[in-house]
Image (cartoon, helix red, strand yellow):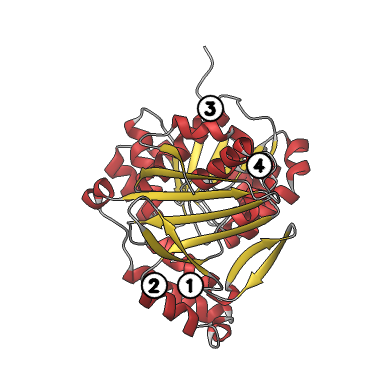
Amino acid sequence: MCATPRWMIYGANGYTGRLIAAEARARGMAPILAGRSRAAIEALAAELGAPVDDVRVFDLGDVDRVAAELADVALVLNCAGPFLDTNKPMLKACLQSRTHYLDITGEVAVFERVIKWRESFVEAGIVAIPGVGFDVVPSDCLARRLKERLRSAHRLILGIRLDASASPGTARTYVHALPAGGLVRQGGTIKLVPPAWRTRSIDFGEGPERAMTIAWGDVSTAYHSSGFTEIEAYFQVRPWVLWAFRLSRPIRFVLAPRALRDALGRVAARLYHGPDAAQRERNGARVWGRAEDREGRAVTMLLRCPDGYALTVDASLCAVTAVLAGEVAPGGYTPAIAFGAAFLDRLRGVSVEERAG
């Protein structure tokens, strides 16, 4: 009988990493729990009843050291952000150790890097799929479904609505991204735009709500997975948030120095704790998508799903299971390229409906 492949959660002691680790153990999976803080990782292992052999402590400063830690690991799920920093050394280590790589990022630069390196992953015989959480599984798969429904579509408009507050890691990532502003894709090319560059009303199922453009991961992924050359992503916001982003335009470059963003990121991480179990149970999320072609045809769909963090847990573990089962050939992918739009059907509490207008 073949032994179950060993796999690892790196950043297991973070907010989302802990949720994934706990659910993995509840599903009978036995991931190695890893991170850079021995006290935090060992405390988590004790809490979850994980044996000593399922604990590893290392940082990402030395790629050779990381590769050595991954030498007997079939797959690593990276939950340690900001992923713009952690993704590159971990990917390099995975290429050395021939370890499959997954993460839960929503950062455009990470998706672009993985696509650029895809031939290296093929040569190494490994799979690399960033964004196997709420960023960007539901939106990437919805974009693919819209494209399948309207093959001639070239333009994609997405809207995201979340009930949940940010986790410490997400808050830190937001701070690091502030100087960049927003991102859209025009004529097939990613373009930098100011914060809250455009707004529009989106009906997430309960009437029109105001939303503003953001740098969502699908500015990258929907181009690669579904061939959209014009992409805008919007996030539902309250009026005061919209105006705060607009007022930040003249001063956002003050945050460009890395040391300042690191300091502000630490403050943000202390202010945001993420939803507790009761809040995650109550919360939900919605993704609205519209595909348009040059002849004026359009298709609109609305995806409803559980709390974004709950979906991240479920989607990431489904992705781990699929990759370890050999469902994906070596290469670098978005979730929709790796698993198809039907991946949504594997996830708990996800529904998609086509809507008029």
Q: Amino acid at mark 3?
A: Pro
- The local secondary structure at tag 3 comes to loop
Q: Nearer the viewer, mark 3 or mark 4?
A: 4
Q: Can residue 73 be seen here?
A: no
Q: CA distance from mark 4 to mark 1?
A: 27 Å
Q: Of callouts 3 and 1, which one flags the residue occurring earlier in the amino acid sequence?
A: 3
The answer to whether marks 2 and 3 mark residues whose Cβ atoms lie closer than 8 Å is no
Q: Of callouts 2 and 3, which one flags the residue occurring earlier in the amino acid sequence?
A: 3
Q: Amino acid at mark 1?
A: Val
Task: Sort mark 4 into few (<14), some (14-19) or many (20+) by Cα contacts within 10 Å.
Answer: many
Q: CA distance from mark 3 to mark 4?
A: 21 Å
Q: Amino acid at mark 4?
A: Tyr
Mark 2 lies on residue = 268
Q: Is residue 261 above or below residue 92?
A: below
Q: Of callouts 4 and 2, which one flags the residue occurring earlier in the amino acid sequence?
A: 2
Q: Is residue 219 above or below residue 153?
A: below
Mark 1 lies on residue = 175
Q: Amino acid at mark 2?
A: Ala
Q: CA distance from mark 3 to mark 1?
A: 37 Å
Q: CA distance from mark 2 to mark 3?
A: 37 Å
Q: Of callouts 3 and 4, which one flags the residue occurring earlier in the amino acid sequence?
A: 3
Q: Residue at x 54, y 48 (%)?
A: 131
The answer to whether marks 4 and 2 mark residues whose Cβ atoms lie closer than 8 Å is no
- The local secondary structure at tag 4 comes to loop
Mark 4 lies on residue = 333
